[in-house]
Image (cartoon, rainbow, N blue to C red):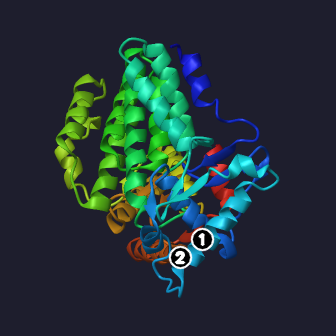
Amino acid sequence: MNQSNNLKLCNSQKEENKLQIYTLGRFEVIRGNQMLYEKSSRSKKLWELFKYMITYKNKNISLDMIHENVFPDENYENPKNVLKNSVYRLRKILRANQPSDNYNNIILFSDECYKLNSNDIWIDIDCFEELFNRAEELKKGSAHDAVTLYREAIALYTGDYLNGYSNMDWVVPIRSYYKRLYLQCCLGLIALLEEMNNYKEVLKICEEFMTIEPYEEEIHVSFIKALARNGQIKEAIKHYEYCTSGFYRTFGIKPSEKLKQVYDNLKKNTNQNNSNKINIYDTDKTRGAFYCKPQTFKSIVQLENRRNERKGEEVLIGSIVLKVEDCIDSKHLLQIIETIKQLIKDDLRKGDIFTLWMENELLLMLPNLSKSQLQNILSRVVEHIRKILKLEGFSVTYRCLTNTEKTKILQI
């Protein structure tokens, strides 16, 4: 069976009047152009019940299990009637403006159990898993078809399963399962793309994965290798430093043997002067913030921004501006800037990032901080600079960048 037929089969259930359910990175229940899911406090429990049924679709779920998992904090006098009423309301919503016969078989009841019958429903996780399995079957005999199928599966995975839409314990193992499939899908596609020497797409796949899961070592290894094979040796080294400092900051762990081997290979194949090479063991011992060039800073901010958008969080950037009078010559100014760079490096954490954005302005990105925390740290750093550099004709100020200013940085 060729690739186009595979895709046709996977998407054949997405008919205009067919119920379509999206769970990866979003939760949507759609029929045609009609959005059936409405996020409101009044219907929260109703849709939580439906998410639970989707998660355990085609399985008989006892009334006790539903009550324990969906209504754990509720003490109803008659929980069976409450559940019966909730199912009635769900059925009514799902068959809105449709003949009753079309929707009577979606939620079934027998032997004191409910079951969501997904035979006549299109669900993104079913299509995602089907595409992945077919790609795995085809990757050895028909690599180009497998690549297309992997791409289609990855396109469906816009985020974790029910991420942000359910925090119940029962979601966790299912969410982990689909995240593992997504990783295997990316690694399978990367392996085939590497065979085709398509490193640009490898970089794109890795970047997309890192916005969802920033701490998967195998993806970082693939990303660094692809940068190197694409001729971007310096960027590969910078990413190694960035990801290893992130692992250390978050988990308190040093680079694995696999990452060290990748770095050692970079050192062997680079044409940089020995003085510009960074010894891996020295890197492990380095304390303080990570200084990088403006373009690298921009790339890291873009990556953090894409990842944080999925979590509904904001990337904060601080600015430290130097003001000098004409009495300070350019050579002296460079010495001052180098001193300030070292002070910032020593004052901040390993994993914090900063750059000399313009000749008199430094930008700093300090992950996982609130705006008030960032302002307090900027204040402390600036006070330290003022204390060390007691110069006439020199002043230093700080602030947090506005959203408009951050947008301009990412567009430059």
Task: Decide which of 12, 346 is in the foreground and name it.
Answer: 12
- Find disc 2 in the rendering and name its residue: 80
Q: Residue 313 bears which disc, if any?
A: none
Q: Secondary structure at mark 2?
A: helix
Q: Quadrant of the C terminus?
A: top right
Q: In the image, residue 70 lies at what x, y percent?
A: 49, 71
Q: Secondary structure at mark 1?
A: helix
Task: Decide which of 391, 142 is in the foreground and name it.
Answer: 142
Task: Decide which of 209, 294 is in the foreground and name it.
Answer: 209
Residue at image x 36%, y 65%? 343
Marks 2/1 in contact by CB < 8 Å: the verdict is yes
* 13 sits left or right of 113 in the view: right
Above or below for 23 versus 391:
above
Q: Mark 2 is on which residue type?
A: Lys
- Find disc 1 in the rendering and name its residue: 84
Q: Mark 1 is on which residue type?
A: Lys
Q: CA distance from mark 2 to mark 1?
A: 6 Å
Residue at image x 35%, y 50%? 215
Residue at image x 49%, y 60%? 364
**Number of numbered callouts drawn:** 2
